[in-house]
Amino acid sequence: MIQIIESLKEKHLKIAFAESMTGGYLSECITRHNGASRIFSGSIVAYTKDMKINILKVKSKTIDEKTVISNEVATEMVLGLKKLIEADIYISVTGNAGPTYDIGTNKFECYIGYLFLDEFKIIHHIFENNDRLANIKKVEKLIEEEIKKSLSILW
């Protein structure tokens, strides 16, 4: 993450997170480094359904129809984050990192909402195992790769 932090500093860009399955890990990856305040706008850890609905304004209908582990919820999380925090890059993460399955699921997966300037995308990843920490670290790597791609295209 240090390379991303340095690139964001150099380009005077700020980042914000709406974290569910990562539980604040992404924010900690940023704030453990010197100069984080120059690039980190903030984070909302919306681990529960109620937090997603009440803080990030994810529609309860979306959760009921699609479940919290869906591209629709990741989309609404990132859009809700944008209304709350000023940044250049907005990232949301929802999913199940393991070690047990959520009710009604049979896989470990995540959906990452990514919004940078006019670029919006959803990244869907199915994890190979139920190692919670390894899967959360995989999310960090997926986000790093996406930011690197965006920055290399634009500058």
Image: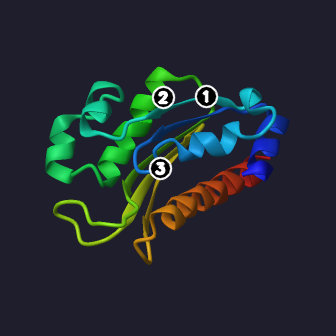
Residue indicated by mark 3: 22
Circle 1 residues within 10 Å: few <14, some 14–19, many ≥20: some
Three-letter amino acid code at the position of disc 3: Thr
The local secondary structure at tag 2 comes to helix
Front position in the image: 1 or 149: 1
Front position in the image: 38 or 152: 38
Residue in the image at 80% along x and 47% along y? 155
Q: Is residue 129 left or right of residue 58?
A: right
Of the two numbered discs 1 and 3 on the same chain, state the one appearing first in sequence: 3
Residue in the image at 38% along x and 44% along y? 75
Residue situated furthest bottom in the rendering: 128
Kindly report which numbered mark, 2 or 3, lies closer to the viewer in this rendering: 3
Kindly report which numbered mark, 1 or 3, lies closer to the viewer in this rendering: 3
Residue in the image at 68% along x and 32% along y? 14
Residue 54, given in percent of the width and then of the height, sits at 28, 25
Of the two numbered discs 2 and 3 on the same chain, state the one appearing first in sequence: 3
The local secondary structure at tag 1 comes to loop
Residue 8 is drawn in which quadrant? top right
Residue 74, given in percent of the width and then of the height, sits at 38, 46
Q: Is residue 64 left or right of residue 22?
A: left
Three-letter amino acid code at the position of disc 2: Lys
Three-letter amino acid code at the position of disc 1: Ala
- How far apart are the two marked residues, 1 and 3, measured between alpha carbons? 20 Å
The local secondary structure at tag 3 comes to loop
Residue in the image at 72% along x and 32% along y? 39
Residue indicated by mark 2: 82
Residue 140 is drawn in which quadrant? bottom right
Residue indicated by mark 1: 87
Asked if the residue under mark 3 is in contact with the one under mark 1, i.e. CB atoms within 8 Å, the reply is no
Residue situated furthest right in the rendering: 10
